[in-house]
Amino acid sequence: MKNTVEGNEIFDKKIEQLLGNLLRVGVIIASSIVMIGAVLFLFHHGLNYPDYHEFKFDPFSITNVGILFSQVVAFKSVAIIKLGVLLLIATPVLRVMFSVVAFLYEKDFMYVVFTLIVLAVLVFSFFS
Amino acid sequence: MPHIDNLLFSILVYVGSFSAGLLGSLTGLGGGVIVVPMLTILFGVDIHYAAGASLIAVIATSSGAASAYVKEGYSNIRIGMFLEIATTIGAIVGASLAGIIPPNFLYIIFAFILLYAASSSFIVKKENGMENAEDKHAQLLKLNGSYPSLIGIKKYSVQKIPLGFGVCSFAGILSGLLGIGGGAIKVIAMDRVMKIPFKVSATTSNFMIGVTAAASAGIYLKNGYVNAALVMPVMLGVLTGAFFGAKILKNTSSKILKIIFSVIIIVMAFEMFKSGLK
């Protein structure tokens, strides 16, 4: 029993290292996209006045991601920033998905269930 | 607040967010707790937009720092994943409440959080974990672990899991409500309640912050709190600030930093109270 726990710990650390790198790559890609959007935004709207003082209801649904892509292709700066933001939000979600696989591989079914619960909560947040 | 254009606004917000990320990383309290009051008080941004921008920045710093933390070998993925059940459910509750609770209350809750953050950064941490008794819940949930220390591998056993789980739900609610990482409260749950060694608590908490914030993010997007043009300088600023903070961490005296940080936070808490009572 004890040996398997320690074996798992070493495996856990390898997986964590892999996931840590995955997260970092995700952040680098996402922030590069936001950066491109930022340059475009300031180029086109830099001299307009911002208005964040009052809240205006402008919901974004994940189901509208097709529309977002068409705007990104049209080089709309706000859409490019949104795409980067969505990719950024996806990185921790991806980490949880990979953890499901890692726990399955370790045959730690209790943690497979725990991780699936976390994933279900995340899915609920985006698709409810 | 005079009328300034997008370019100047973005530059100023970037500089402010950079400083917030730098201070947050140097003191270990995270940038979110400074970014929200900075945006609302200094820039007059609506608190929902401020929370949305901060939440995205929190995800960026948590994910960006993860690989560095893993390398040190302190984080415990089972503790993290188990407690994420509590923090993510809490985050959804908090994010949903953010749309219902009047903004004035949000300001006042935030002021209390700031005062708490200012005081918590001075509490001396003592390492725990060695002398803990075995806990049957911890064994069942396979939460016990070990970490590298100067005198070799140290083992620890986790205590009071139900209470720790409860405190983590509360941390999740605050994170969703205010757009902060809530790292300080997660560390309390793990370090003080569950008696997990401080370094393990702090690094595991960093992992949990990103997933917790992602749970709020879905609701924030739907409610329109994430304003792309505002997120851009905040996210890039906090991220680069935190990155430089991590680089210079070893060469700075944290005592002076903590005093600077606390003074800023107390002033902000006072201003948040004033805004809340208007």
Image (cartoon, helix red, strand yellow):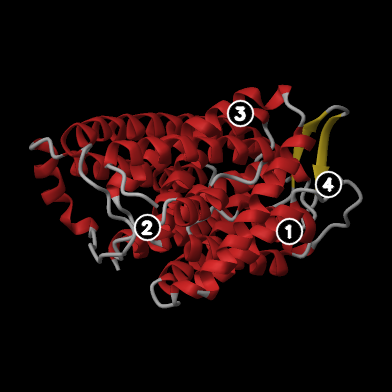
Quarter of the C terminus of chain A within the rendering: bottom left
Q: Which residue sits at x=64%, y=55%?
A: B267
Nearer to us: label 1 or label 4: 4
Task: Give the residue number, with chain letter if any, for mark 3.
Answer: B246
Q: Which residue sits at x=78%, y=46%?
A: B197
Q: In this view, does B57 lie to the left or right of A9?
A: left
User: Given contact means CB atoms under 8 Å apart, are the residues at marks 2 and 1 in contact?
Assistant: no
Q: Where is residue B198 in the image (x, y as percent from the top left)?
A: 76, 45
- Which of pointers 1 and 4 lies earlier in the amino acid sequence? 4
Identity, as a three-letter code, of the amino acid under mark 1: Ala
Classify A111 as above or below B223. Answer: above
Task: Give the residue number, with chain letter if any, for mark 2.
Answer: B49
Task: Give the residue number, with chain letter if any, for mark 4.
Answer: B125
Identity, as a three-letter code, of the amino acid under mark 2: Tyr
Given residues B136 and B55, the one toward you in this image is B55
Q: For residue B219, say whether it is visible.
A: yes
Q: Position of residue B80 (x, y in %)?
A: 60, 51
User: Marks 2 and 1, Cα distance to the nearest angstrom?
Assistant: 40 Å
Task: Give the residue number, with chain letter if any, for mark 1.
Answer: B138
Mark 3 vs mark 1: same chain? Answer: yes
Q: How crowded is mark 2: few (under 14 residues within 10 Å), some or many (20 or more)?
A: many
Callout 3: SS? helix
